[in-house]
Image (cartoon, helix red, strand yellow):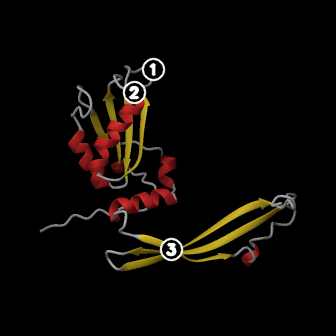
């Protein structure tokens, strides 16, 4: 028996094989209704990173198009095969294709997911109670590596705050855990009355 594995990375998906382009959407319904229907029909195939519904350009016939971005290439492919040529929420069949063109600027950099998107993705794959997290330690590291000092010649009155954090993720059903490290830095104006 062959098992197919799809690795889902906790990063912003930019690959063509994870993005669907949907067109032939009639102008019969509102943009909000179309968004709701497309989300309902496509989210059954897997976790969605984003969904956008837009009106066609003025040179095209009236209607809408949508772009659906999945975290998983396999789920995007499955959704494309299952929905192409079907009406779903309208009488006219939709055209659904995997995207063939992306903005090269997006493909060059790997962008991390926001904390909210990470939690959404973890809840989707592990279940709402399938995982938990805790802050192991949080330290002010502003005084190390001259982090709190601004370079000479800087005219602004500002202080750099830098914090390091260790977070542990526990996967309760599997009895496993892992730790991750993060650093955040913020530049604050050094105004004596600011915190009064």
63 to 148, vertically: above or below: above
The answer to whether residue 67 shows anywhere in this view is yes
Q: Percent position (x, y) of residue 31?
A: 41, 30
Closer-to-camera residue (127/78): 127
Residue receiving disc 3: 134
24 to 105, vertically: above or below: above
41 to 182, vertically: above or below: above
Q: Percent position (x, y) of residue 162?
A: 69, 69
Give the CA distance from mark 3 to mark 2: 43 Å
Q: Which mark is residue 30?
A: 2
Q: Percent position (x, y) of residue 69?
A: 38, 47
Q: Is 171 left, or right, of 103 in this rendering? A: left
Packing grade of label 1 (10 A; few <14, some 14-19, many >=20) is few
| Residue drawn 23% across the image and 29% down it | 93
Instruction: Give residue 9's quadrant in the image.
Output: bottom left
Mark 2 or mark 3, which is nearer the start of the sequence?
A: 2
Mark 1 or mark 3, which is nearer the start of the sequence?
A: 1
SS for callout 2: loop
Give the CA distance from mark 1 to mark 2: 17 Å
SS for callout 3: strand
Packing grade of label 3 (10 A; few <14, some 14-19, many >=20) is few
Mark 2 or mark 1, which is nearer the start of the sequence?
A: 2
Residue receiving disc 1: 58
Q: Is 104 left, or right, of 163 in this rendering? A: left
- For marks 1 and 2, give the one nearer the viewer: 2
| Residue drawn 69% across the image and 76% down it | 141
The answer to whether residue 11 shows anywhere in this view is no
| Residue drawn 86% across the image and 59% down it | 193
Quadrant that contains the C terminus: bottom right
| Residue drawn 37% across the image and 24% down it | 63
């Amino acid at each position: 028996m062959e098992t197919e594995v799809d690795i889902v990375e906790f990063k912003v998906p930019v690959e063509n094989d994870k993005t669907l382009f949907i067109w032939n959407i009639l102008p019969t319904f509102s943009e909000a209704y179309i968004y709701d229907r497309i989300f309902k029909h496509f989210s059954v195939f897997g976790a969605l990173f984003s969904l956008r519904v837009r009106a066609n350009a003025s040179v095209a016939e009236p209607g809408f198009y949508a772009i659906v971005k999945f975290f998983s290439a396999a789920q995007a492919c499955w959704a494309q095969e299952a929905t192409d040529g079907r009406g779903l929420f309208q009488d006219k069949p939709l055209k659904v294709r995997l995207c063939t063109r992306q903005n090269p600027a997006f493909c060059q950099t790997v962008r991390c997911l926001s904390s909210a998107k990470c939690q959404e993705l973890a809840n989707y794959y592990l279940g709402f109670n399938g995982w938990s997290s805790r802050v192991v330690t949080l330290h002010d590291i502003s005084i190390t590596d001259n982090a709190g000092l601004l370079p000479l010649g800087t005219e602004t009155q500002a202080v750099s705050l830098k914090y390091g954090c260790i977070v542990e993720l526990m996967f309760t059903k599997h009895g496993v855990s892992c730790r991750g490290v993060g650093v955040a830095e913020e530049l604050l104006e050094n105004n004596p009355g600011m915190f009064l």
